[in-house]
Amino acid sequence: MEMANRGYFGHNSASGEVFGRRIAHFYPIGAHSSWWVGENLLWSSAELNGAAALNVWLNSPEHRAIMLSARWRDVGVGAVYTRSATGVYGGRDVTIVTADFGVRS
């Protein structure tokens, strides 16, 4: 929701907080000795459903590699639709999808 509300698109937060630190608030290492995370982002000005988002990522070698890594044990997916999004979205109606992947061991 932050990306839609603040008009930016990126792995780091609008305040500049890097992805790893941001995601650690929600996915802490806890008592584990190692921690790995990955993220895929997507935005579209057209209507977008889950199958379409998955197809876009699967057709991108970098995003496909993140999604299909055998390392991941946890996944979280979120999507938000907003009208007249500001900033990088140029006032368009947009759907923003985030998929986060993680493993702690």
Image: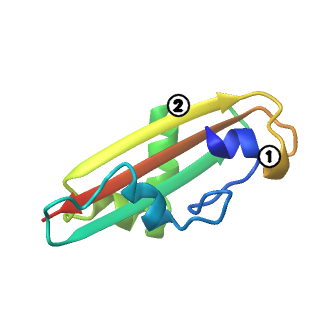
The disc, 2 or 1, on the residue closer to the chain's N-terminal end is: 2
Secondary structure of residue under mark 1: helix
Q: Looking at the image, which residue is at 44% across and 45% down?
A: 54
Q: Is residue 73 left or right of residue 84?
A: left
Q: Is residue 50 left or right of residue 35?
A: right
Q: Amino acid at mark 1?
A: Tyr
Q: Position of residue 69 (x, y in %)?
A: 26, 64
How far is the residue under mark 2 from the one under mark 1?
Answer: 19 Å
Q: Is residue 103 above or below residue 94?
A: below
Q: For residue 16, what is the image quadrant?
A: bottom right
Q: Position of residue 86 (x, y in %)?
A: 84, 42
Secondary structure of residue under mark 2: loop
Where does the C terminus fall, quadrant-wise? Answer: bottom left
Q: Position of residue 23 (x, y in %)?
A: 42, 56
Where does the N terminus fall, quadrant-wise? Answer: top right
Marking on residue 89:
1
Which class describes the residues within 10 Å of circle 1: few (<14), some (14-19), or many (20+)? some
Residue 44, visible in the rendered structure: no
Q: Identify the residue position indicated by label 2 in the image.
A: 49
Residue 86, visible in the rendered structure: yes
Which class describes the residues within 10 Å of circle 2: few (<14), some (14-19), or many (20+)? few
Q: Amino acid at mark 2?
A: Asn
Q: Is residue 75 left or right of residue 38?
A: left
Q: Is residue 105 above or below residue 74?
A: below
Q: Is residue 33 above or below residue 68?
A: below
Q: Is residue 50 above or below residue 75?
A: above
Q: Looking at the image, which residue is at 36% across and 67% down?
A: 65
Marking on residue 72:
none
Q: For residue 61, what is the image quadrant?
A: bottom left
Q: Is residue 87 left or right of residue 77?
A: right
